[in-house]
Structure formats: C-alpha cells, structure tokens
Amino acid sequence: MRNNLSKSLDFTLAAEGGYQCSKADDGNWSGGRVGRGNLAGTKCGISAALMALVMGSVSAVNSSVMRKITVSQARSIATERFWQVMQCDSLPAGVDVMLFDFGFNSTPGRAVRQLQATVGVQFPDGTMGPDTLFKLVHAKPADIAPSISHDYAEQLQAWLGVSPDGHIGPRTLQAAVEQQAHDAMLIYALASRQEAAYRSFKNFPVFGDGWLNRLEERVSIAHQFLAAQDAPPAVA
C-alpha cells in the first residue's frame, strides 16, 4: 500500500546498514561480478552494480561515489527501482513489505515470481502485471495453502486461533475464510518461499542466520501493517 512506503523503507535501509566493501561480494563491484569494473562497495543496500545502472556507467562508480550516497538518495533509488517496479502501492498491507524487502534483499524478479507461483499465475515471469494483481486478489485460501511450510502453518493456525499442527486442513481453511485471512495467508506463504530461497543460496552457511532473522522481522512488521489496516478509524 502507498501508506506503507516510508515505514518499509525505514525497515529495509536499517536492515541493510551502512557502507561495506568486501572483495568477495559481487554487488560491491560496479560490473556486478567479482573482478568486473571497480571495487566500489555498497551503502544502505545500494550496490555498486545498481549504482552503475542508475548512473548509466560502470566506470564512473567508485568507492568515493558509493560513500557519498545519502539516506535520501538511497530511499529514492529503492522506491524507484524496487517499490515501484514491484507495484507495492497496489499490494495488500503486509504483503507489500514482504515483497519489497525480499526483492531489495534478493531481486524484484525473484520476489514477484514467488508471489506469482503462490497465487497461481500459469507462467511466472517476475513482472508485476494485471494478471498477477488479479490472481492475487482472487486467490482462495485453498489455493494459497500449499505454499505455506509446516512451521509457518503453525504460526498461521495460532494467529487464527486454531490448534496448531502444521497441517492446513478443513478446520484451518474454514477459520481462514471466516476471519477473512486472505492477506495473512499470503504473508505466511511468501515467508515460506523466502525462507526456502535463502536456504538454497550458496552463501547460506555464512549469512543464513542474518537472513532468517531479517525474515522473522519482516513477518512481524507485515503483521503490524495488516493490523493497522484492519483497525477501526480513530474517533476525532
């Protein structure tokens, strides 16, 4: 949702941290691969490779350019290159930050393909188009359920007030329908797919704990957004 952009940026940029310049990180090289272009670093999650795209030049991006990136500039780039590309303004509260933060941390294409697979887009292409948005709105609990892992199914069941067993059966689906839990199910389905993606990455043994901690924080803020959306308006 549009109202969640600023808080989503706050969360993501805080998780990304400041300047770092590891030689072993592809994103720290302006050419997008170790040894290609300049070793320039990353700041606020804005990689040297992304900055080269923004500036239209691989050779112009160096450590000095990267160190001078301001928080305001990082927010602008993140909005244009991630939030807007994934059409997060059009997504339900909670789903927006789940997609945005993972897309920023991974790639927009991977994040969108996961959503497309969850809601039944026949040919996931990583592009957030009208068909994906239509499928997202009209996906039924029974359609979303297969994407939810055992552990996240237990969390969903606890949230619904159903005895948690990690299996989304008729009772859980009925509770989801009665409580209009479509968006909450999408949050848990995306969390399940994002966890699986992290565990598949070659650097998981090194960075996995941090990625999973960030995922849990992402789910938490998604629930905050969802609760704020569902809350009755304040009385003046």
Image: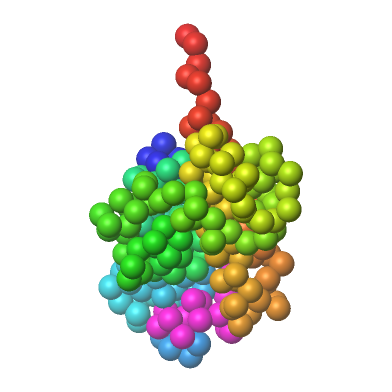
Q: Where on the picture, by quarter, is residue 146? A: bottom right
Q: Position of residue 184 (x, y in %)?
A: 54, 44
The residue at the far bottom in this view is 35
Q: Position of residue 23 (x, y in %)?
A: 58, 83
Vertical relation: 225 (above or below) 199? above
The foreground one among 229 and 49 is 229
Residue 202 position (above or below residue 55): below
Farthest-out residue, front: 170
Direction from residue 178 to residue 52 in the image, left or right: left
The magenta stretch spans residue 165: no
Image quarter of residue 92: top left
Identity of the residue drawn at 70% across and 77% down: 206
The answer to whether any part of residue 79 appears in the image is no
Q: Residue at x 49, y 53 (%)?
A: 142
Q: Residue at x 61, y 82 (%)?
A: 202
| In front of the other: 72 or 223 | 223
Q: Position of residue 220 (x, y in %)?
A: 63, 46
Q: Is residue 169 something that shows in the picture?
A: yes
| Residue 82 x/y as whole percent | 39, 58
Q: Which residues are magenta?
A: 20-33
Predominant SS along the magenta part? loop
Q: Quadrant of residue 148?
A: bottom right
Question: For this rendering, which residue is in front, 83 or 149?
Answer: 149
**Apparent side of residue 51 relative to residue 25 in the rendered image (left or right):** left
